[in-house]
Image (tube, rainbow, N blue to C red):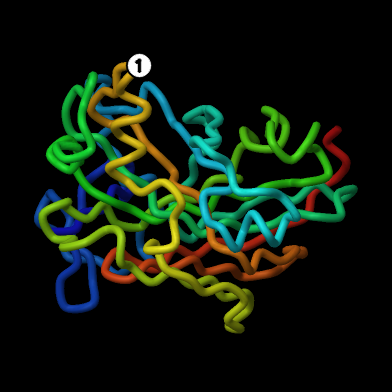
Amino acid sequence: MKTARVAWAGQILNATEESGQLRLSNGRLVAFDDVVWLPPLAPTPANRPRTILALGLNYVDHAKELAFKPPSEPLAFLKGEASLMGHRGVTLRPAEVENMHYECELAVVIGREAKHVKAAEAYGYVRGYTVANDYAIRDYLENWYRPNFKVKNRPTCTPIGPWLVDAADIADPMNLKLQTTVNGQVTQSGTTADMIFGVADLIEYFSQFMTLYPGDLILTGTPDGVVNCRDGDVVVTSIEGIGDLQNTIQEIGTTK
């Protein structure tokens, strides 16, 4: 099953797809364009992400693309919930930057408390999967290996959604095709099979020294093929079996 969260008529509701429209949790059937799409995460405090973990250089080809040796253990950084934005939203691009890159990523949503989990049991702790686009404004990097808050925590720069797909409906999260288009042109393609550290490995790694809670997110990195995005670009990041996440770039004034 796949579900979304949307704003409609002053309410925040869950939604499912039905005959090319949205069936809202209040029973109404509405068009996709009639709602504001929100991140597809539970709004209750018990299920909001306490922690958002994101991976850098988790695909061999992407590491080579950035001229770095693949890491020997997960290269992770933290993100704030305020950076998340829903499907069909507008991502703001500071006018002064030269390199703002999309990053199509499989996002893992934790379903139950995980501590000292072994990889062989890790999938039992996953609630579901969604698509994330973790924009990187590389002008602001201190260095390639330690993305700072200015790069990865800007409002509107992490679109996520549109759907949360139940873990049971994804037979193998480590064999999914990923693709990005910019203005309808394919600019990135890859597969989760090329991750250096897979979903189960990441859950084992993080849960050895911290506790993962329901609603926590792990953004698993992106393949090679990232390109600079400009004002007006329409970017669609897609993952097989999970969905197509769209957003539009809008340039804004200097925000240093």
At a point 85% along the width and 45% down the height, the residue shown is: 253
**Count of picture labels:** 1
- Residue 200 x, y percent position in the rendering: 27, 42
The answer to whether 44 appears left or right of 180 in the picture is left
In this rendering, the answer to whether 142 lies above or below 175 is: above
In this rendering, the answer to whether 202 lies above or below 38 is: above
Q: In the rendered structure, which amino acid carries the disc numbered 1? A: Met
The quarter of the image holding the N terminus is: bottom left
The quarter of the image holding the C terminus is: top right
- Residue 218 x, y percent position in the rendering: 39, 38
Q: Nearer the viewer, residue 31 or 206?
A: 206
Q: Nearer the viewer, residue 227 or 233?
A: 227
- Residue 190 x, y percent position in the rendering: 48, 71
Q: Which residue is mark 1?
A: 210
In this rendering, the answer to whether 90 lies above or below 79 is: below
Q: Nearer the viewer, residue 248 or 81?
A: 81
Is residue 7 at all visible to an observer of this figure? no
In this rendering, the answer to whether 242 lies above or below 78 is: below
Which residue is situated farthest in the bottom direction here?
185
